[in-house]
Image (cartoon, grey):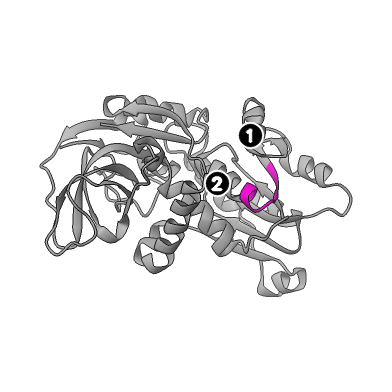
């Protein structure tokens, strides 16, 4: 099989396509011939050497794939050769062939394309868990969504729209019309004074009910100040650690660490506020929480309420170009790799 390896810590040029032996499906597993694999920001951080959950480099990352089952392991039920599936391997997704536990695989709806299937698992399950499981989402809430044009951002917009929420989305100005077309009522320039712009937008004593933040560092403290009574800050990423360059930056890491705000239980009690965190990687060990959410997302897709958006698709041989595009913060929604 062919795989895209991170050969060492460094810029996108460290990515390399290599040949490896085909895996074999064991008991309770299925083998999938991959049609598309999703790229996530965590993959970029793994390549920079600042993602602690990633396997030791050299390694193959990738959390989500779509494809066709070509081998079913012993005693594996619910799947047959030829089934169209999508699922979540625990790394290794940048491969033309993967083996996944049957518990991590799902049948694709008939009207779902392989590209849509590869664009759904990580970002939509993150958004669903963040909003409905952790964020206590209720209809009509006023929600501040940072990096709204990213993969998780667009997934969250679908879910927030379905719940009748008022959405304030941050992004560079060139993405604002795109976000409005997706359902965002208010767009804020992410390159400017976001805190001041949001305060001016809500006006007076207006406050935010829920903030979803993948940036981290000093932004956590500023976001917390925007919350009203009963408000929640959900932290689901630390993109500020990656900096703006294409190599690991010690300065960016230190800036992140020294910018972190701290809260005491008494402060949270007196303010009636909540700070929560979401990291879906550890949830692989708690599939009883994840799988029902995934099944709910499949039903929402079938009902036409969520719409996975693929910005660009790159062949394995152009994985380096895909990462340059991601570093340039040009992506809207998902980037995919195809064998």
Residue stretch in magenta: 160-168
Residue displayed at 51% across by 59% down: 129
User: Is residue 187 found left or right of 281 in the rendered image?
Assistant: right
221 lies above or below 172: below
The residue positioned farthest toward the right in the image shown: 204
- Residue 46, x across and y down, in percent: 37, 44
- Residue 322, x across and y down, in percent: 39, 28
**Residue under numbered circle 1:** 179
Quadrant for the C terminus in the image: top left
**From this viewpoint, is residue 231 visible?**
yes
In this orientation, which residue lies closer to the viewer: 202 or 160? Answer: 160
In this orientation, which residue lies closer to the viewer: 184 or 273? Answer: 184
- Residue 138, x across and y down, in percent: 67, 61
Quadrant for the N terminus in the image: top left
Name which quarter of the figure residue 201 lies in.
top right
Question: Of helix, strand and loop, which one carries label 2?
Answer: loop
69 lies above or below 210: above
Indicate whether residue 162 is drawn in magenta.
yes
The tag on residue 39 is: none
Residue displayed at 48% across by 47% down: 301
The tag on residue 305 is: 2
């Amino acid at each position: 099989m062919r795989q895209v390896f991170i050969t060492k810590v460094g810029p996108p040029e460290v990515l390399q396509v290599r040949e490896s032996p085909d895996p074999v499906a064991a008991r309770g597993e299925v083998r999938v011939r991959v049609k598309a694999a999703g790229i996530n920001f965590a993959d970029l951080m793994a390549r920079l050497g600042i993602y602690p959950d990633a396997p030791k480099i050299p390694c193959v990352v990738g959390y989500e794939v779509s494809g066709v089952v070509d081998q079913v392991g012993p005693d594996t039920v619910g799947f047959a050769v030829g089934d169209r599936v999508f699922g979540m391997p625990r790394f290794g997704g940048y491969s033309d062939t993967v083996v996944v536990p049957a518990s991590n695989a799902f049948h694709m709806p008939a009207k779902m394309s392989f590209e849509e299937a590869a664009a759904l698992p990580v970002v939509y399950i993150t958004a669903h868990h963040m909003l409905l499981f952790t964020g206590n989402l209720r209809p009509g809430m006023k929600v501040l969504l940072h990096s709204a044009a990213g993969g998780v951002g667009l997934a969250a917009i679908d879910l927030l729209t379905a719940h009748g929420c008022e959405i304030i989305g941050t992004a560079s100005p060139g993405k604002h019309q795109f976000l409005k077309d997706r359902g965002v009522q208010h767009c804020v320039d992410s390159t400017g004074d976001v805190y001041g712009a949001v305060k001016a937008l809500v006006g007076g004593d207006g406050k935010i009910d829920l903030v979803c933040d993948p940036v981290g560092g000093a932004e956590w403290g500023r976001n917390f100040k925007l919350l009203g009574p009963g408000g929640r800050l959900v932290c689901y990423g630390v993109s500020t650690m990656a900096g703006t360059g294409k190599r690991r930056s010690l300065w960016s890491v230190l800036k992140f660490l020294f910018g972190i705000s701290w809260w005491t239980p008494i402060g949270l009690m007196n303010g009636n506020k909540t700070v929560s965190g979401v990291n879906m990687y550890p949830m692989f060990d708690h599939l009883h929480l994840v799988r029902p959410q995934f099944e709910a997302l499949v039903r929402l897709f079938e009902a036409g309420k969520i719409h996975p958006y693929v910005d660009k698709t790159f062949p394995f041989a152009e994985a380096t170009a895909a990462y340059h595009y991601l570093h340039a913060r040009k992506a809207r929604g998902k980037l995919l790799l195809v064998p």
